[in-house]
């Protein structure tokens, strides 16, 4: 019996989306842990952005191996990064509202009777959550496409050279 290729493909793309969702939450904690490195150093930039290669490289290489194209791995990486950005900012809102944070107790759900609760949340939601999402979704789409395309092109090029050497 032949496997249902379409079902397998859908499952693969759902897995990429799940990887992105989980990575976004991981990245939220990771950025908190690495915040002490300093905001102006090159090391901080590498540590903060280099971690995004962790979900990208395996997904891109796997998709490149299966599809033998560069556009599908690029699209897969865009999906991973977009889902990561969305889950990062949704987790930020969840943490502020449900879990709480010492510096922002006015945003915790227990403060809902405060007269400024909803206006505070409107400002945080529009400015920090939606604003951050829009800013970083653009980076996720453009950067994800570039990284996915370059990594898959290199992988497929190296693989083609190996095949030519052994032939």
Image (cartoon, rainbow, N blue to C red):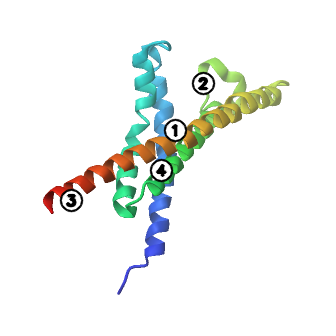
Q: Which residue is mark 3?
A: 163
Q: Looking at the image, is mark 4 or mark 3 earlier in the sequence?
A: 4
Within 10 Å of disc 2 (Cα), the crowding (few <14, some 14-19, many 20+) is few
Q: Which residue is mark 2?
A: 101
Image coordinates for residue 146, horizontal then vertical, percent:
48, 42
Depth order, front residue of 158/58:
158
Q: Are the residues tagged 3 and 2 within 8 Å (C-beta)?
A: no
Depth check, mark 3 against mark 2: the one in front is 3
SS type, badge 3 = helix
Depth check, mark 4 against mark 3: the one in front is 3
Identify the residue at horizontal 75%, vertical 32% (top origin): 126
Q: Looking at the image, is mark 4 or mark 2 earlier in the sequence?
A: 4
Q: Which residue is mark 4?
A: 74
Q: CA distance from mark 4 to mark 2?
A: 37 Å
Q: CA distance from mark 4 to mark 1?
A: 9 Å
Image coordinates for residue 64, horizontal then vertical, percent:
37, 56
Identify the residue at horizontal 33%, vertical 59% (top origin): 65
When asked about the image quadrant of residue 120, the answer is top right
């Amino acid at each position: 019996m032949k496997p249902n290729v379409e079902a397998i493909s859908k499952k693969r793309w759902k897995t990429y989306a799940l990887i992105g969702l989980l990575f976004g939450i991981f990245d939220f904690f990771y950025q908190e842990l690495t915040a002490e490195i300093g905001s102006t150093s090159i090391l901080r930039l590498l540590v903060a952005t280099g971690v995004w290669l962790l979900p990208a490289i395996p997904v891109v290489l796997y998709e490149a191996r299966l599809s033998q194209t560069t556009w599908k791995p690029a699209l897969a990486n865009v999906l991973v990064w977009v889902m990561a950005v969305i889950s990062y900012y949704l987790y930020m809102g969840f943490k502020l509202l449900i879990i709480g944070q010492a510096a922002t107790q006015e945003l915790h759900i227990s403060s809902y009777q405060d007269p400024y609760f909803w206006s505070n949340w409107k400002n945080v939601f529009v400015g920090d959550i939606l604003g951050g999402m829009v800013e970083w979704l653009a980076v996720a789409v453009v950067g994800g496409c570039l990284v996915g395309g370059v990594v898959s092109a290199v992988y497929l090029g190296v693989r083609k050279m190996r095949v030519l050497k052994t032939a």
